[in-house]
Amino acid sequence: MSWARTLARLLVFREPEEPRYAFTAGRKDRPRERGPGADAVEDKKNKLREGQRVDNLLEQDRLLSTGLDENERLLRQVFRHPENKDLVLRPFSLSTDPPRRALLVFLDGPTDKTVQNLAILQPLMLLAGLRLDRDLDGEGPVPGAGDETAREALLNRIQETLLPGNEVTTAASFKDVASEVLAGNTVLLVDGLDRALSVETKGWATRGVGTPRAEAVIRGPQEAFTEQVRINVTLVRKILRRSSLVTDFVKVGQMSSYQCAVLYLDDIANPDLVAEVRRRLESIKADYVNESGILEQFIEDAPRGLAPQVLATERPDRVAAALVEGRVAILLDGNPWALIIPATFFSLMHAAEDAYVRWPFGSFARLIRYVGLGLALLLPGSYVALVTYHQEFIPTDLLLAFTGAREQVPFPTVVEVLLMEVAFELIREAGIRIPGTVGTTLGIVGALILGQAAVAANIVSPILIVIVALTALGSFTIPNYPFSLSVRTLRFAYIALGSFLGLFGIMVGLFVHLALLARLTSFGVPFFAPVAPVTRGAPDHLWRGPVWEQECRPDYVDPLRRRRQPRVSRGWVRARKKDDEEPGGR
Amino acid sequence: MASPRLGFNEAVALTVIFLSVKVMISHLALMFPLGLSATWMIPLMHLPVGLIGFAVLAWLLNQFPGRTIIEIGEELVGPALNIFFALVIYVFFTGGSALVLRQSAEFMLTDFFPDTPISVVAATYMVGAALIVYLGLETLGRVARIAFPFLIIGLALLILLTANLWQPHGIYPLWGPGILELSWVALSTLGVGVEIFFLALAAPYLPQGRLLPIGLISVLAAGLVVAAVILASLLVFPYPVVQEWTLPVFAITRAIEWGGFFVRMETLFLPLWVFSALLAHATALYLSVATAARALKLPYHRPFILPTVVLILAAAFVPPNFPAAMDWGFAFLVRWSFIFLGVIVAVLVAAALLRKRQQGKGGKTGRRPGRRTNHT
């Protein structure tokens, strides 16, 4: 009986039993000796050696041989077959005379079986005899192994006449073959040929183009990026129909390479900026870069900076607008967020809709956002400072209201504020983690009930609920999520400063904060450009100027073409000439 | 390391703030007894001297492009005399910063934190200033540029909100103590503009060929700002009253009446004091450490920040009390500074002229000014 054993163990001292580990990794506390564990160590070493051999095979870019069996054996090693059940090796014969052995290599799952059957297996198994024999009749006998020209001819014939897939490429090395198979393509190996043919058969499940979730607008396009880089590029191309729009692909990550599309307008973007983006992407030596947030941290100028230096967006229209300004966009495969480079403080405070509504309202929305930023960052700290140190500055009527409301609260103001701020952050975080509508409900119910209960229990004053609510609203007005995270975090620093040194502390903190932000750059562009340093451009940073005044691209991007539109972009406002018979003059 | 670049707007913003920060401390309190009802004219009378003085300084700096006044001094008067000049500049800006720091801290203590130790307030100021100087001149310029519109708008608001309190008779008699006496006061307080010396150390980092306009615009703008603030003070409080205040500008913020609800408006203007003081302390600290680094031919100024901050903090507590700090500050920064720094500039200008004349006589055999020495 277990309780008896426990009692005995407690009462009677016994030497502890030697623990037995099934997994002994990292246990260096005992000398290695021959015994039952020695085989496991040896197995581990063998496994490691085998892994290194395969890695070398790929890293040294070993070429395929003409022997199909040898290629198959090595590919099995590369993909750890037969342990790896995803790999499919489908042997078959080309229906030539005599028949020629061939092998299809693909992964079960990411490939489209219909395409494989109709566009690869069917023509090769049924039509190869007809097409190849007929096509090669005029050029001599069917080529055999050893004759390079003949091999080339056979490869070309298969590629050109038998594989109706829209994208067929050749692969010469095991690394290429592995890369193609992992990308969801189907690779065809033919006996006697030292090159493989890769047919585009990607067929993995994808999400359709949805609506933006973090950057929703009332007026403007309602499309958002999806997880497929090709679809995302298409979404941008759909908006920006210009032949100079270049999509350059760079692979990022070593353990699992991801395609990273670098988009720019060749006739507008600064070549140095494009080269710098490429340089940074190519220089990344990391196992796994599967998300744009991770990629952002690898390429930003100051990863320890207080604000993001890259603009993340899920809106294709925003990417298109940025490209037209001369910026560069990065799209990472498997990720619905694009990164726009360079980013400035003002671009982080912009929303797509600013440009879609008439300029006074776009400017007003921006003004509200800056007020929101100020509230989110400084309001709780200022409240603590005023109530703790500067009561005399509060108008008497308001002070009486504050004092009356706080009379029953036992905590000092700073504790009260911290309690509510932390509670709000908890609700916010829980609301995100709890799935679906429950999260939203929890957010509302939690905030209401918690706030009401806290006031009823005299834990906090009603005034503070107003302060916390205004702070929360302010933080929600910040359109860029990473930037709002920065503001949310720094708010606590300002609360601390306000509680230690009052408004003076907050002012000094703000000064230091400004200095640290002013020091930041995004791919060399100062964070506060075009205000500090002052650079030329259109009226589109602090406020949104009228569209007809957006004549120049921002100077800090240093675009190849500075002017965006002529000085008089509304041709119809020209004074009507005497001989102008057409209506429309002023 | 790439050398910093200070744009036109950043340089003007920083220089104007540095020049006009004295309206925020107690200098004005000691100016009113001298200028009486015509005190507002003193900055305007300083303007021609300031503009001409800066034009002379700019001429000297333009003779040696890419160099600061310290390196120019070394070439013109030799290392021995130049190290003395550098020491004077270092002591002047360190000491001046200490006296202004004491006044800023005392002000903060008197009006906002009566229970806080003055050392905490002074140290907080210096931490902010030291951090921005550590980050560099470029950052300092950018922060000044961002803060500048807010400071100017704040000051304008402060002046305009007192409009209902203006008493036009406050500026009469128009010439105050009399035109001769007023001229003498203006002459004896020329030191209020020596902060323009900042440009002599920032010259290599300014846009090429823009030194003169930057300096002239800054002097003009600062003169007008100071004159406007003094005029507003005199219009709100007649001069017998205004000279009683240790901080006249703060007194006018307290006098603002805007309905029954907003009774204490000085909180709204607190950023004016804190930001302008922090920027002024940071600029003075930069001047001190840059002078030390240039004089000792070191490529970086950062090693001098901590020792200079300690010196400033120590010197700030030498005056026994606030009135003493005010008196010493006025004497040191307003009365005598022009003589110290003016003599240095005069000697260097004379040496440059002499060299130019000698080169003119000696044809092209002499060494041309403007060529860089190895250590720069």
Image: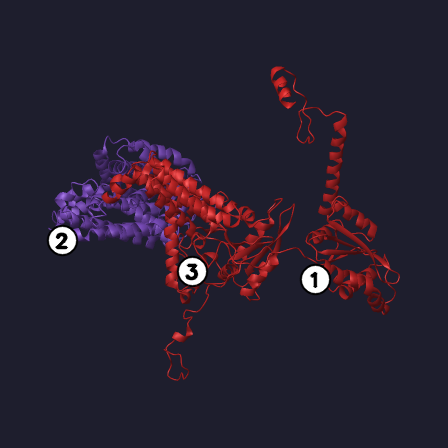
Chain colours: A red, B purple
Q: Amino acid at mark 1?
A: Glu
Q: Residue at x 26, y 34 (%)?
A: B114
Residue B73 in view in this figure: no
Label 2: which secondary element: helix
Residue that mark 1 sits on: A167
Q: How many other residues sit within 10 Å of disc 3, few (<14), some (14-19) or many (≥20)?
A: many
Q: Nearer the viewer, residue A286 or B30?
A: A286
- Amino acid of disc 3: Asp
| Circle 3: element type | helix
Disc 2 from disc 1: Cα separation: 86 Å
Q: Which residue is mark 2?
A: B168
Chain containing the residue with disc 3 = A
Label 2 vs label 1, nearer the camera? 1
Which of A518 and A485 lies nearest the eye of the viewer?
A485
Q: What mark, if any, has residue A354 been given in the picture?
A: 3
Relative side of A242 to B269, left or right: right
Same chain for the residues under marks 2 and 1 in the image:
no
What label sits on residue A307 in the rendered view?
none
Q: Residue furthest top?
A: A12
Q: Is residue B58 above or below residue A155?
A: above
Provide the secondary structure element on which disc 1 rests. Answer: loop
The reply to whether residue A45 is in sight is yes
